[in-house]
Amino acid sequence: MVSIARVSTFVPTRRYTTQNNTGKSRGSTRKQITVASDDGRVRWGELSAREKAARTTQQTFNFMTVLVGLVMTGGVITFLYLEVFSPEGKTNQFNRAVDRVKKDPRCTELLGSSKKIKAYGEPTWNKWARSRPIASKVTTDRTGTDHLLMHFNVEGPLNTGVVNLHMTKSPSQSEFDYKYLFLDVKGYPRLFLENTDVQTDSSDKQGKGGKKKFLGIQWGW
């Protein structure tokens, strides 16, 4: 009896794996950065050449804005100091002139009580709008002397008037000095509170034997 041996054969099987590659990156995507949309979150090294140019433009604009703001702030501070806070500023000179008018008995005789005298800038149709700018200017002559000219309005219970002043400050001086300060009230002679021209003429007369000056000529009577 012949036995037939059962031969078993082993056939190896292969396992195939597939990859689903679509050729597109699954990583996160971002919008292109522009001058208007750049918020600084993306690092410089990750920017393209165009995006770097956009960021540079934005930063330059921001820097110029800050610089202009600093310059304007400095200008405002300087203006406030020179016009308001400086002892020789126009505002302080205006206040001093108003005080001179209120304290002078001749002025109060024309205008009325010093407590009721008001001073203001250019006149306006609106009687409530008194905070008008004071007309003034500062010039420098050839010798380096500064000239401050100013005029403003005063109003009292009796009359209204206009005050004019001219002050000078030479390079060797630290403060302005009055050249003249006078009050004009319609219907009355000009009232001088300061007038260096008259003082100079008086000094010349006393120093020259009492000679009087008329039409620019010294007369000996």
Image: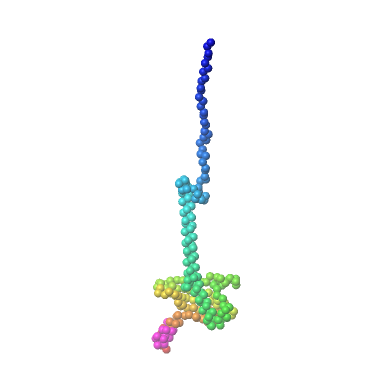
Please name the residue shown 51% across and 46% down the image.
32
Residue furthest out toward the front: 1
Task: Identify the residue shown where x is 52% and y is 42%.
Answer: 28
Task: From the top left corner, tell me how far across and down residue 207 is, in percent.
Answer: 40, 85
Seen at 49% across and 68% down, the residue is: 80
Q: Position of residue 198 (x, y in %)?
A: 45, 82
Residue 150 x %, y %: 50, 74
**Height in image: 21 above or below 43?**
above
Q: Is residue 129 above or below residue 46?
A: below
Task: Give the colour scheme of this rendering.
Answer: rainbow
Question: Is residue 111 magenta-colored?
Answer: no
Q: Which picture quadrant has residue 173?
A: bottom left
Please tell me whether residue 210 is drawn above or below residue 170 in the rendered image: below
Image spot of residue 206 (x, y percent): 41, 86
Front residue (pair 117, 7): 7
**Farthest residue, direction bottom:** 221
The answer, for residue 215, to whether it is visible in the render is no
What residue do we see at 52% from left, 81% from top? 104
Picture quarter with the C terminus: bottom left
Q: How many numbered callouts? A: 0
Magenta residues, as a range? Answer: 202-216
Answer whether residue 103 is visible to the viewer in this image.
yes
Q: Nearer the viewer, residue 83 or 193?
A: 83
